[in-house]
Amino acid sequence: MSVAEAKTVKENLYEGMFLVNSAKYANDPDGTSGAIMAILERAGATVVAQRPWQDGKLAYEVSGHRKGLHYLACFRMPGAGMEVVKRQCHLSDVVIRHLVIKHTPQLFNAMVDALTGETKEEPAAEAKSEPAAAKEAVAEAAAE
C-alpha cells in the first residue's frame, strides 16, 4: 500500500441551502433535485439528508427572480470540495444562489433529524405532560 492510499481525508459536515427557480422545480422536481445532487457528487460530497424547504415570494429580486424554492441538503465532504461546489453552482442554470455552512457534529445531527422528520419521543412526551400538569394546578387553584 502506498503512502497516497494510506492517507485519509477528513470530511467536514455541511449544510447547504440552494435557491432554485421554483417554476423549474414545479415542472421537474426530480430533475432539479438531481441537478443539485450532481453538483454535490461532483465535489465528492456524501449527502445524508435533503429536501425542499420553502417555496414562495422572495424578499427582494435575486438575479431577475421574484419567486424561488429553498432546497436544503446536509452532506459530508472534504474541505477541498468547496471550490467545486461554488464553481458548479455559478455555472448551473438551476441554482440561482447558494449558501453552505460548516456544522459541528451535534448541530449537524440535529439538522439531519429535522430534515428526515426523525424526532425523539421522550422530550415531546415530557413537554406535553408539563402543560397538562400546569392546567390541573390552575383548575385546582380556581376550585379552592
Image (cartoon, rainbow, N blue to C red):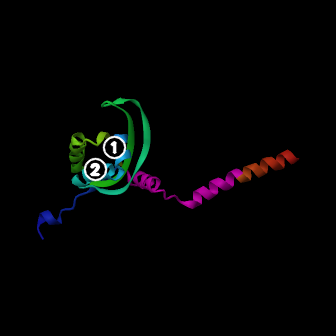
Give the Cα separation between the discs numbered 2 and 1.
11 Å
Pointer 1: what residue?
Answer: 24
Residue placed farthest to the front in the image?
A: 27
Depth check, mark 2 against mark 1: the one in front is 1
Amino acid, disc 2: Ala
Residue placed farthest to the right in the image?
A: 144
The quarter of the picture where residue 20 lies is: top left
Residue 35, numbered circle: 2
Residue at the location (65% across, 54% down)? 128
**Residue 25's x, y, as percent?**
36, 45
Quadrant containing the N terminus in the rendered view: bottom left
Q: Is residue 36 above or below residue 118?
A: above
Amino acid, disc 1: Lys
Residue at the location (75% across, 49% down)? 135
Q: In this orientation, which residue lies closer to the viewer: 92 or 122?
A: 92
Residue at the location (58% across, 60% down)? 122
Q: Looking at the image, is mark 2 or mark 1 earlier in the sequence?
A: 1
Residue placed farthest to the left in the image?
A: 2
